[in-house]
Structures are given as structure tokens and as C-alpha cells.
């Protein structure tokens, strides 16, 4: 990893999906590489919260490993599931 003259890593990641397998691994990788990162606690459905996260944290990169899966109501809420998993991810 490239470092600044002061020895700090210039990267700062904002990670979504902390409780999932991939999201958890992303955090471990960041820690092992000395990369500054923050897990968001916001929901992908809330665009304003996502925009606030980005404005406040000022990440160089955003990882989205979040999504709605395996819930009993996914089949009966297809529009909301697609909106969250596809449209919110495109933000």
C-alpha cells in the first residue's frame, strides 16, 4: 500500500454490510492493511443518510456489501427488495 510522507495510508473506506460475511471480511482486510475505515449503521433504503455518511466521513472508497436476503418477506416485497439491493447500490 502506498503511504503518505507522514507514514499514514491515504485510503479511507466507508463500508456497508458489517453483519454479513463479506462485509465482515472487508473490515478485517482493512484492519490488517492499516486502512482507515468506518462501518455505516445506516440502511441502504435511506438515501439521505447515505449522502450524510459520505459528506461526514469523506471516504476515498465506498464498499457496499449490504443487501436484503433470506428474509421471509422478500418474496412478498419484491419492489422494495429490488429498490434496496439494486437501486440503492447504484447511489
Image (cartoon, rainbow, N blue to C red):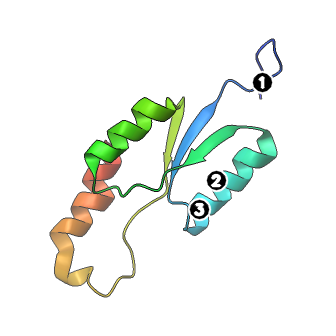
Q: Is residue 74 above or below residue 37?
A: below
Cβ atoms under marks 3 and 2 closer than 8 Å: yes
The percent coordinates of residue 83 (x first, y second) are 22, 59
Per the model, the C-alpha gap separating discs 3 and 2 is: 6 Å
Quadrant where the C terminus sits is top left
Residue drawn at point x = 64 percent, y = 29 percent: 11
The residue indicated by pointer 1 is: 8
Chain-order first, disc 1 or disc 2? 1
Q: Residue furthest bottom?
A: 72
The answer to which quarter of the image holds residue 85 is bottom left
Cβ atoms under marks 1 and 2 closer than 8 Å: no
Tell me the SS state at disc 1. loop
The residue indicated by pointer 3 is: 22
User: Which is closer to the viewer, label 3 or label 1?
Assistant: 1
The percent coordinates of residue 2 (x first, y second) are 76, 23
Q: Is residue 61 above or below residue 81?
A: above
- Out of 67 and 48, give the one closest to the viewer: 48
Q: Residues within 10 Å of mark 1 (few under 14, many from 20)?
A: few
Tell me the SS state at disc 3. helix
- Out of 48 and 67, give the one closest to the viewer: 48
23 sits left or right of 85 in the view: right
Residue drawn at point x = 78 percent, y = 41 percent: 33
The answer to which quarter of the image holds residue 69 is bottom left
Per the model, the C-alpha gap separating discs 3 and 1 is: 25 Å
Tell me the SS state at disc 2. helix
Residue drawn at point x = 63 percent, y = 42 percent: 37
- Out of 31 and 48, give the one closest to the viewer: 48
The residue indicated by pointer 2 is: 26
Amino acid at each position: 500500500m502506498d503511504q503518505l510522507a507522514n507514514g499514514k495510508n491515504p485510503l479511507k473506506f466507508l463500508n456497508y454490510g458489517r453483519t454479513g460475511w463479506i462485509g465482515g471480511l472487508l473490515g478485517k482486510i482493512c484492519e490488517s492493511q492499516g486502512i482507515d475505515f468506518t462501518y455505516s449503521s445506516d440502511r441502504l433504503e435511506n438515501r439521505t443518510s447515505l449522502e450524510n455518511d459520505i459528506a461526514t466521513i469523506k471516504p476515498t472508497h465506498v464498499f457496499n456489501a449490504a443487501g436484503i436476503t433470506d428474509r421471509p418477506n422478500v418474496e412478498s416485497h419484491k419492489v422494495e427488495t429490488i429498490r434496496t439491493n439494486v437501486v440503492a447500490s447504484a447511489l
